[in-house]
Amino acid sequence: MSLTSPLRVAVLGANGRMGRAVVRLAHAAGMHVVCAIATDGEGRDAGELAGIGTLGTIVGMDPRAIESSGAHVLIDFSAPAALAQAAPICAGAGIALVSGTTGLGESAKRALENASATCAVLWEPNMSVGVHVLASLVGQAMTALGSSFDVEVVEVHHRAKVDAPSGTAIRLGDVVKSARNAHYVYGREGRPGARQTDEVGMHAVRGGDVVGDHTVFFLGDGERLELTHRASNRDVFAHGAVRAATWLARRPAGRYELADMLSGERGEIRPLRRSRN
């Protein structure tokens, strides 16, 4: 791909709220949306579906169209099953893959890992740059506070979110688990007994139209620290995915994280990830 040519983007989940935002923001960034795959809206123009007028790209329902679209990168905000189907298509065509789909099962995880052997793959449960700053701060807090503070993670999302806890909450909890020998406790009820030192509490709240709030509580004797990220607009995730697509389209095959992109933009060198749980 020429470094000066407009990036050609395919969008999986183009009819969803995130997919429509990706189409809109990719077009605004000067990218060419050359393929749009959705579960409904077949035959409509992807630009009209996104509210930005005609783009000339007609929405389809068959992900095999990605292969012949000429796309440099696929941006996915769909469902685990759709992602599992699209990943080998990207791998076969050498199309980079950026995915923000959450709630992945083993099939989708394997599909991403297998695809990374022949194309660049970046999967993140939260494409917000601010969330990754939060994760870094959680790690710093764990080092500074030590093991005497109990840690609980609380996430709040809209009533329509189908998976719980959120992938972002798990990512934040994993930062804690990597710093101490701990296990997750998903909510509490009845008489679970006194809280143990090796617990990481994980709590999911659902309701209204909340885009996404995540708070990590550090609870000590006589004091507590709360680190919070709140997303007030879904565009923050779409912006991150579009930014990641620009960076990933020029990367060799392998597994990447948003942190790799951020460090790469700063000129730092990070190792290529070949596997990820």
Image: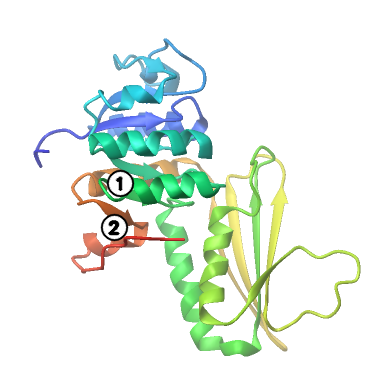
Residue 151's place in the image compared with 92, above or below, is: below
Identified at 71% across, 52% down, the residue is 205
Residue 239 vs residue 246, the one in the foreground: 246
Q: Amino acid at mark 2?
A: Met
Identified at 45% across, 13% down, the residue is 42
Q: Amino acid at mark 1?
A: Arg
Question: Do we see residue 212 in this rendering?
Answer: yes
Residue 235 rendering spot, x and y as whole percentages: 44, 41
Quarter the N terminus occupies: top left
Q: Are marks 1 and 2 in contact (CB under 8 Å)?
A: yes
| Whole-number angstrom distance, CA of label 1 to CA of label 2 | 9 Å
Left-right relation of 191 to 161: right
Identified at 69% across, 55% down, the residue is 204
Residue 229's place in the image compared with 43, above or below, is: below
Residue 30's place in the image compared with 121, above or below, is: above
Instruction: Report the residue marked by disc 1.
Output: 243
Instruction: Report the residue marked by disc 2.
Output: 261
Residue 262 rendering spot, x and y as whole percentages: 30, 60
Question: Do we see residue 79 in this rendering?
Answer: no
Residue 270 rendering spot, x and y as whole percentages: 25, 68
Identified at 47% across, 49% down, the residue is 109
Left-right relation of 26 to 84: left
